[in-house]
Amino acid sequence: MKIRTAVTAAAALIWCGALVQIAASQESFPDEPGRDAMMLACTQCHSPGKMILADLTKEDWEFVVYDMIGRGAPVHEEDLADLVKYLQDNFATDK
Amino acid sequence: MQKLVNELISGRISRRGFLAGMAAASFGSVSAKSALAAVEPMVPGSPLPEGFSRSVTGTGADLIVQQMIETGAEYLFVSNGSGVGPICDALVDNPGLQLIQATQEGQVVSIADGYAKASGKTGYGMFSRVGLPHSSSNMYNAMKDRTPLVLFSDHADTDREGTDSHEDVDYWVEAVAPYTKWRWTARQPERLAEWTRKAYKISTVLPGGPTHVRIPRNVMYTPNVTADIYSGEALNISMDLQPDAREIERAARYMLEAESPLLYVGPEVSQTNGRPALVKLAELLAIPVCQHRSFYCDFPNLHPLYLGQLPALRSYLAVYPKPIDCFINFGARFPVRNRSLVSGHPVIHASVDPMSIGRNTALASALLGRLDLVADGLVDAVKSMATPAQLRARTEERMAKCKAHTTSVQRAREIAARGSKGSPVPWPRLMYELIRQMEKDAIVVEELGTQHKTLSYFNFADDGMTKIGRTEGRALGWGVGASAGVKLAQPDRQVVSLQGDGGFLFGQTDSLWTMSRYDIPVMTVVANNRCYEETRWQMIGRNGRAAQAGRDYVCKLGDPDIDFTKLAAAYNIPGAVVENTDQLEPAIKRGLRTLKDGRPFMLDVRTRTLGAGADITWYPDYSVADQRKRKV
């Protein structure tokens, strides 16, 4: 019984944590062109939190996006410019 | 199957027992009989047709060399050791074998491994009896890749072995048991030819792998030994491992009925020359393809149905939003971690290795056989179940969406490469410039970390370039030697070796000696980012104590800052250092011109590192000189 209670409590905590994370994600990632491409291509290997914390300039972001595409991040040609702009506008240290 | 083959040719089971064992292991009767025909000449007491053997008298080493030549050996890769002496004596009267020397045992094995992977033949190596531990890292790599190698060494004389004397320990061959398909200490001179062909046969039977034979030196030097040498014809009977027809039909039906199937390909496809047949199958049913990590490219990587490695599947499913409902593993050995891909719907596994099939996953269909034959069988079965119009109706939308997706991703990749510039050199631009200069059928030998994903720029296909490496075992210290072996196997194709600075420093400078000694024209490109980037990502990315303290204990390499062209120059190999993208094109052109002139070349490209820990400058800077109390 105790075990079941503990498991339920843990599950509830994880669920609440997930909700908080989703809320934080929605807040931190404004709905602008490039957001969907980022969520699809970048988050298959990196957590969204890493992108918020990355200490990168606008120039760095372009380099990183190109480098990641070179390393297999699947970005469509038509989304590329929006993706770079989205990351620069929202997360660059010199935005 | 290898266990059954071993038991048959050791006389521990009968022919009937072999066929029964094959049936129990799910081989069809045609495959079992074909396998039996292939190994039958090796069975003790088997009568040989006339002309299939000849009697030879010579030293024990003479018998080894003559039997090796009969199996098709062109090269024997060696390192120095007095135990190689009997073979050197034998070569005087048996000039059909070209000896290629490396400066240490590990590189003997990597050169032999590269040769075997590029030629499809068995690689032969020999080294000193005490060199076995040194050789074992690349022996392990060969075992993980199932590369056919026969590796000899000498052994303590028969009157001294087992006494813990000079250069001897007990149970030598046990040390490499996990890395070899078979291992033996051969003590009877009249049976040396027999052990040689047995080692060859076992290493070659699919799935292949290294074998190791130790021979006491006095046994190799024994004079006037008479034994039968078997002709190559008696040994090289192709093994036509046909898959079971009923199983093929069942698998074909699953694939045909699926709305969103996925092909997952691994190295056995290339090892059984299955790529062309697999392309036909994928195209017939418009099945997208993901590549398992492999030392070959097992599906043309610029093909419209090729998605890349498994993480890339997610973006395909965004344009074709139907969950995978049939997972077809063609020749990949590893388990798939994403449970949703391999449960709740039919999973099919095709392999030449009954030990591998179903080892990690519950299967709806198991297809045992050579993968080219499996793919051909599936194509025929599908065609017999649906008309071309029915097939078109089922596959048209999937093909169109997958093609639009992969074409757009490839275009973005090219834009990214062209837009990458500056100093240090970005990886995508390095690959892009290499492709622009290299020949269209060049061979790329790679031993990179996660940067291997930048190889997606190359056109690896049967009518394009070939990729060899990185090994499945991933023990570093393989690529430079392997590239030399690849060039020996394919002297008329351009060979470029891609190395990280970290990987190169795993004792690989030594293979530059072999390249220079034998005029092996390979361009070695060291992507020099002055760190072990991949391991830094793993360690710092976990944000543990070291990461929080800003300490990079083992991943930083920049001190000393190595100029790899100077290492190459010590071996009389020319080279160039590239600091920025403007210098790339002329340096690559110079390198490729040097290859045309018949000499190797070293390209040291200063590449940029990024990601977790890239900004950490701390490393354990420690000076023994500063600790001294006396300046001596």
Image (tube, rainbow, N blue to C red):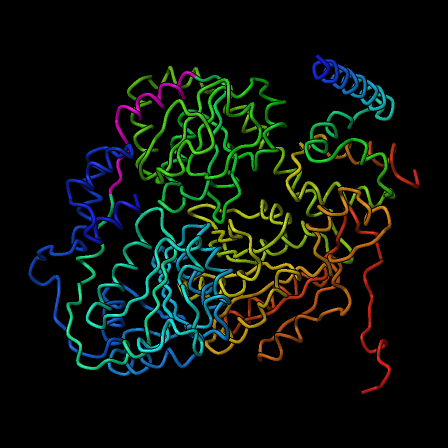
Q: Position of residue B453 (x, y in %)?
A: 61, 45
Question: Taking B195 as reference, is B208 left or right?
Answer: right
Q: Image quadrant for the N terminus of chain B? A: top left
Q: Position of residue B573 (x, y in %)?
A: 58, 76
B143 and B489: which is toward the camera: B143
B165 and B571: which is toward the camera: B165
Where is A61 relative to B86, above or below? above
Q: Position of residue B63 (x, y in %)?
A: 22, 73
Q: Position of residue B531 (x, y in %)?
A: 73, 58
State the residue at coordinates (17%, 81%).
Answer: B224
State the residue at coordinates (45%, 26%).
Answer: B286
**Can I make out residue B205 in this image?**
yes
State the residue at coordinates (28%, 20%).
Answer: B384
Q: Which range is magenta?
A: B240-257
Residue farthest toward the right in the current orientation of the protein: A94
State the residue at coordinates (70%, 43%).
Answer: B416
**Can I make out residue B581 in this image?**
no
Q: Is residue B388 magenta?
A: no
Secondary structure mostly seen in magenta is helix
